[in-house]
Image (tube, rainbow, N blue to C red):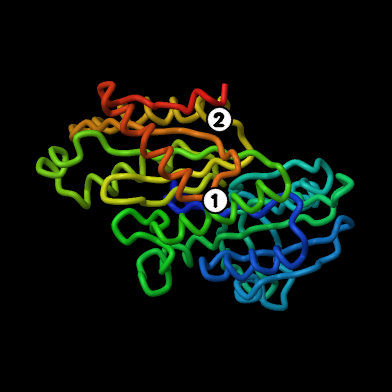
Amino acid sequence: MPAPPMSTSPHRLPLVDLRADDAEIGRYAALLDSLGVALLAFAADGTPALRNAAAEELLGDSTPTWIDENGRPLRDDERPQLQVQATQQPVHQRAVGLRTPAGTAVTWCRASAFPVFAADGSLRRVLLLLADRQHRGRVAGDRQELPTHDPLTEVFNQRHIDILLDDESRRARRYGTPFAVALIAIDHFAACCLAEGEGRVLARTARLLCHSLREFDMIGRHGADCFLIILPNVRVNEAMVGLERLREAVETRSAEGGATGLTISGGVSEYTGEDAPALIERLTSLLASARESGCNRLCVNMDLF
C-alpha cells in the first residue's frame, strides 16, 4: 500500500534544546500534545523513557509494524529513532506508516527524530516525533484546538511566536547556542490586498515562506503584514543564505499560475543577549531600512560581521 502524497504543511513545530533535561522534555511533550503530535523519548540504549498523551492515543498498547512509503516493513536500522541512536544526527520529516497487529489499516505519519546530549557531549535521549497526518488536518481546521495558530495563515499567532522567541532566548543564554531571527513583511501590502484580498495574500505568503524553511524553523504572524521567523542553531551569515533563497522563491513562485506577484522585505539579526522587545525593535528598524532601499531585499545587522 503506497503512502499518500506528503503535502507541505505550514505548521512549524517548536524545537527542544539539544541539551534539554528531563523536566524540559516533559514540558516539550505537553506542548506537542496541544498540537496533536506524538512524542516518544528513549534512553541512549533504546529503552523507552517517556511518551506523551498523543503518543498513547496514536499507539495504544500495541507494537505496530513500521512500513515505508511503498508499504515495505522497515528494518530496525531504518527506524528514525534507531538511526539517530547510531549516528547522533537528526532525521527530518520522513513518511512512515504504522500498522497495528489487529488490522490492516495504516496510520501515515511524518516522523522526525533528534538527539539530546548530556553535559559531557554523550547521547542521553533520543526524541521521536510522530505527526498523524489525518489528526493534524482535522486539528488545523478547528481554531479552538489550535489557539497557538493564526486562523488566516495557519502559522503561529503573534502571542505564541513571542513565547517561542522567549524560550529560544533562554536556551541561548543557558547553553550559548546561536540563533537568528528575521522580521519579514509583504511589500506593497495594501495594493496587493486590493487586488486579491487580505486573507488570500497572507495565506499565500505564509505557504511560500513555509515551503522554503527548515522543518524546525519557527514562523508566526507578527502584526498586520509581517511574519517573525526564528532560525535555531545558525549564525546570521548562515541564516542569510537561506533567507535570500526564501526571498527569491517568493518573488519567483508567487506569480505562478497567473496569480498576483508578491515580494517581501526583511530585517535579519542574530540574538546577542538582549530581551525580546529590544530584538524586535532592532528587526523593525532593519525592515524599515530594507523598505526605504526599494523593497524586495533583506537588511542585516552589520554589527555582527
Q: Quadrant of the rendered structure where residue 184 is?
A: top left
Image mark for residue 236: 2
Tell me where residue 25 appears, x and y as whole percent. 71, 63
Q: Quadrant of the rendered structure where residue 188 is?
A: top left
Residue in the picture at 69% in, 57% down = 128
Tell me the kind of residue under disc 1: Pro
Image mark for residue 205: none
Tell me where residue 238 appears, x and y as whole percent. 57, 27
Tell me where residue 226 appears, x and y as whole percent. 32, 44
Q: CA distance from mark 2 to mark 1?
A: 40 Å
Residue in the picture at 35% in, 66% down = 141
- The answer to whether residue 63 is left or right of residue 295 is right
Viewer-nearest of labels 2 and 1?
Answer: 2
Tell me the kind of residue under disc 2: Val
Q: Secondary structure at mark 1?
A: loop
Image mark for residue 2: 1
Tell me where residue 156 appears, x and y as whole percent. 42, 56
